[in-house]
Amino acid sequence: MTWLSTSNSTDHTEVWLQSASDQERLRQDLEWLYEPRSAFRVFIICLLIICGGELFQSPTTAMSDAATLQILGRDELDKYGAQRAWGPLGWASWCVLSYCS
């Protein structure tokens, strides 16, 4: 007897695969995962999604630096380093808080 658990956001299902035919049917349903052509297709889709996300995300650092310098103005440019120092501290504190929760 083999146990299979599947869950999604709306429903939690536990299935006991009691016979070899159930296991064989499950193997056939998931067979596409192990075909090289399907795996390559999934890889290409993931690659395109990641590249698209990076394309839109990459200029945000430069844009936020430009906005910070513009807000500080010419008189307070010496405060730019202190302003930038809060970024890594914010990331570090968020990592610690998310790890602890």
Image: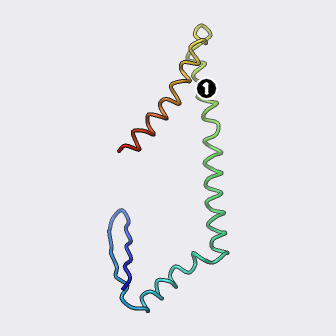
Kind of residue sitting beneath label 1 = Asp
At horizontal 54% and vertical 18% (from top left) the residue drawn is 82
Kindly give the residue lying farthest to the top in the view shown.
Answer: 75
Q: Tell me: residue 4, above or below residue 20.
A: above
Q: Measured from the top left, where is residue 48 in percent x and y?
A: 65, 57
Applied colour scheme: rainbow
Q: Quadrant of the C terminus?
A: top left
Front one among 96 and 90:
96
Q: Is residue 92 above or below residue 81?
A: below
Q: Residue at x 42, y 88 (%)?
A: 22
The quarter of the picture where residue 12 lies is bottom left
Q: Secondary structure at mark 1?
A: helix
Would you place residue 36 above or below residue 24 in this image?
above
Position of residue 61 in the picture relative to residue 90 (left or right): right
Q: How many marks?
A: 1
Q: What x and y, as percent, mark residue 71? A: 55, 17
